[in-house]
Image (spheres, helix red, strand yellow):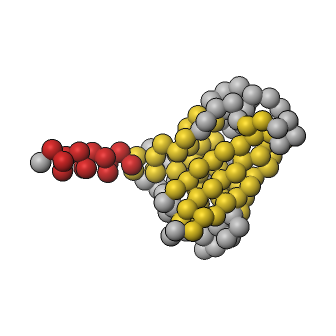
Amino acid sequence: MRAFLFALLLGASTIINTPVLAASTSPELSGSTEQGLKIEIYSSLSPLLINRIHSWHIRILDINNRAVSVEQLTVIGGMPEHDHGLPTQPQITARLENGDYLLEGVRFHMPGKWRLVVTMNRDGEDDQAVIEFQL
């Protein structure tokens, strides 16, 4: 019985009922993967700010704009012109009820050109998007 309750709690913790961002909200950042999936990033802070911790909703869409589930999702980033990464190690902490993924712990510490690499595994295949932007 304890194992069943633990599994039930574990399953409940992976899908979080978090308020969904308004459908009319435009993503702060977006890009496409090598296999044609669309990545949309919605930030809790708009516009993106320096030296503040951000939480992001990451939406992955197919060519028909339907949400896509992935087995693994990671986001790393940095400033290629300065040869350093993000000052934090953002983590995917939940899959949200609407199919988005919650990324927490994003922080940028200086203005300039930034690059994010969004890597995922879907149906056993790796895919990634590179998103560059200026802060």
x%, y% of residue 96?
46, 50
Instruction: Give the image quarter of residue 129.
Output: bottom right
Q: Is residue 63 visible?
A: yes
The count of marks equals 0
In the image, 127 versus 134, the foreground residue is 127
Can residue 68 be spotted in the picture?
Answer: no
Report x, y in % for residue 73. 55, 53
Residue at the far top in the pictured view: 51
Residue located 79% across and 49% down the image: 132
Relative to residue 130, is residue 134 drawn left or right?
right
Residue 53 image offset from top left, x and y in percent: 62, 30
Residue pushed farthest left?
1
Outermost residue on the right side: it is 81
Which residue occupies 65% across, 53% down?
118
Which picture quadrant has residue 77? top right
At x 59% / y 50%, what residue is drawn? Answer: 74
Q: Residue 32, relative to residue 43: is it above or below?
A: below
Q: Which residue is rendered at x = 60% and y = 70% of the image? A: 62
- Foreground residue among 21 and 116: 116
Drawn side of residue 100 relative to residue 86, left or right: left
Assign the C terminus to one quadrant of the image.
top right
Q: Position of residue 108 (x, y in %)?
A: 72, 32
